[in-house]
């Protein structure tokens, strides 16, 4: 059942939702940063604010009051308090299922750009997952920033939906096609680690919009019809536009993090410290749920 404002037939519900959504922009990231002080009486209000930001913008930014004391356990607690309870374990995650995003030489990770200092193109997390393993929520926490670079940019995927629908409603129809995007199988040393996966770019789960996307040119097969190709080109054009008031950019500092409903994001290249203990380190959790709504 389509949520009314995502139905291409219901223009008036869409217009009403669109107006509300765009009225929030441009956003001021500094005022959206929520300082977290766990174990104080203010903490429950702080959590409510994070949930509210995720409800409006599909992301929230936080900063722990005491960054140097933060451990993985604090991040697990925070995620749970926001309704992110079901972690997805990926190929490169540590045993507790939080991935350490840092430059690494480990066998099996050499092909994965997240674990290098290279730029990461626009994507949503888990775009290669099956529908049952869809990533709806994500937490990205910075333990140590790079010496230079490592900036994240992100765009609420609902805004991407609006921009595409404004450009041509047929783009939405094409991107909702169940074969819009195919990711070929991942085969490492002759072993199939992940089978090929085909699916839509935009899907609705319990009335909430989800986007499955990667701007990568390699290991991606777009449906070959003209309108899908045009929609993909439109998105590529969007990524090149530095002036968009809808795109956020921020370099997370130690103790800061981004929580989101798996919005579109990228990362710039970075230069690391020559001291191993001062190298860029982020922890990332991927969840099978969205951030809970505020009470
Ligand atoms: Fe990502």
Image: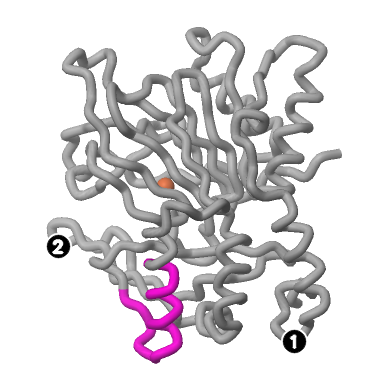
Label annotation for residue 9: 1
Residue found 52% across the figure and 14% down from its top: 70
- Say whether mark 2 is within 8 Å of ligand 1: no
Position of residue 168 measured from the top left corner of the image (x, y, whole percent): 56, 82
Q: How many marks?
A: 2
**Residue 85 appears in the figure:** no
Residue that extends furthest to the right in the rendered view of this protein: 295
Residue found 53% across the figure and 37% down from its top: 139
Residue found 58% across the figure and 54% down from its top: 156
Residue, disc 2:
190
Secondary structure beneath dot 1 equals loop
Query: CA gap, disc 1 to disc 2?
Result: 47 Å
Q: Quadrant of the C terminus?
A: top right
Query: Mostly what secondary structure, the magenta segment?
Result: helix
Position of residue 191 measured from the top left corner of the image (x, y, whole percent): 20, 60
Badge 1 density bin: few <14, some 14–19, many ≥20, Cα 10 Å: few
Position of residue 190 measured from the top left corner of the image (x, y, whole percent): 14, 62
Residue that extends furthest to the front in the rendered view of this protein: 243
Residue found 58% across the figure and 38% down from its top: 259
Residue that extends furthest to the left in the rendered view of this protein: 189
């Amino acid at each position: 059942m389509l949520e009314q404002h995502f139905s291409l037939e219901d223009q008036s519900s869409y217009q009403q939702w669109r107006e509300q959504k765009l009225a929030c922009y441009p956003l001021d990231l500094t005022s959206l940063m929520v300082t977290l002080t766990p174990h104080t009486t203010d903490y429950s209000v702080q959590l409510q604010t994070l949930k509210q930001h995720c409800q409006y913008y599909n992301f929230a930014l936080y900063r722990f009051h005491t960054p140097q004391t933060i451990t993985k356990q604090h991040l697990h607690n925070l995620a749970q308090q926001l309704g992110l309870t079901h972690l997805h374990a990926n190929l490169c995650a540590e045993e507790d299922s939080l991935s350490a995003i840092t430059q690494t030489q480990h066998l099996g990770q050499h092909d994965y750009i997240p674990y290098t200092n290279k730029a990461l193109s626009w994507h949503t997390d888990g775009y290669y997952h099956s529908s049952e393993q869809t990533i709806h929520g994500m937490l990205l926490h910075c333990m140590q920033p790079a010496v230079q670079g490592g900036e994240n940019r992100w765009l609420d995927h609902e805004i991407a939906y609006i921009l595409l629908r404004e450009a041509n409603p047929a783009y939405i129809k094409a991107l909702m096609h169940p074969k819009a995007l195919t990711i070929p199988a991942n085969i490492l040393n002759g072993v199939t680690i992940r089978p090929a996966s085909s699916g839509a770019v935009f899907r609705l789960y319990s009335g909430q919009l989800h986007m499955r996307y990667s701007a990568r040119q390699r290991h991606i097969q777009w449906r070959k019809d003209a309108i899908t190709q045009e929609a993909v080109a439109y998105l590529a054009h969007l990524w090149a536009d530095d002036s968009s008031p809808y795109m956020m950019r921020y370099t997370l500092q130690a103790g800061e993090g981004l929580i989101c409903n798996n919005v579109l994001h990228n990362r710039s290249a970075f230069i690391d410290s020559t001291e191993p203990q001062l190298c860029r380190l982020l922890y990332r959790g991927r969840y099978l749920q969205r951030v809970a709504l505020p009470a």
